[in-house]
Amino acid sequence: MGESVIEIKQIDVSDYLSVSQLFNQYRMFYNQPSDIALAETFIKNRLQNNESVIFVAFADGVPVGFTQLYPLISSVRAVKNWLLNDLFVDNGYRKRGIGEALLKAAGSFAKTHGATFLQLETAMDNYAAQRLYETTGFVKQDIASAFFCYRKAI
């Protein structure tokens, strides 16, 4: 069996269905119940409202991975950076460089749009993801900060 041809494409709202199944799998990876209707609506709304940017990896035309970016706007710095909130590659396509290609596309997009950084978070026990991030140039940040983070449930 030959290697698949991988294409990374930034999608728009007309392509929201191409990522919905993957987004549902991503949520299930984080112990959420399967809900394809919720996944479709969520992705469609993010794209319709220009609230996120999504890149999808296609292997021979079939969607096999995605990353979703959200803007991080800083008033003080007067710049828009990006939070790489979601990265997922279908189990059958892992270890083929797809995650790295998605990260590269996200970084190129952010740089082209004037960002000074791309930020992400991952679980402390997600060692595979940590290796990927560190080998692609992401630097683990020191948790100590000059700021406190507050949250209020509403």
Image (cartoon, rainbow, N blue to C red):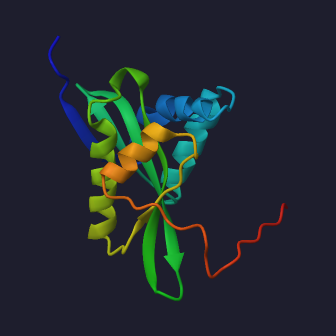
Looking at the picture, tell me which residue is in the foreground, 96 or 84: 96
Instruction: Give the side of residue 69 with respect to residue 154, left or right.
Output: left
Q: Position of residue 148 (x, y in %)?
A: 71, 76
Q: Quadrant of residue 107?
A: bottom left
Image point 56% across, 36% down: which residue? Answer: 40
Q: Is residue 13 visible in the rendered structure shown here?
A: no
Question: Furthest-top residue in view?
Answer: 1
Seen in the picture, residue 107 relative to 146 is either above or below; the reply is above
Image point 45% across, 50% down: which residue? Answer: 68
Looking at the picture, tell me which residue is in the foreground, 97 or 41: 97
Q: Quadrant of the N terminus?
A: top left
The number of callouts visible is 0
Q: Quadrant of residue 90?
A: top left
Q: Position of residue 103 (x, y in %)?
A: 33, 50
Q: Position of residue 26 (x, y in %)?
A: 54, 34
Q: Quadrant of the C terminus?
A: bottom right
Instruction: Give the side of residue 68 with respect to residue 153, left or right.
Output: left
Instruction: Give the side of residue 55 with respect to residue 75, left or right.
Output: left
Looking at the picture, tell me which residue is in the foreground, 29 or 34: 29
Seen in the picture, residue 148 relative to 133 is either above or below; the reply is below
Looking at the picture, tell me which residue is in the foreground, 89 or 80: 89
Q: Quadrant of residue 102?
A: top left
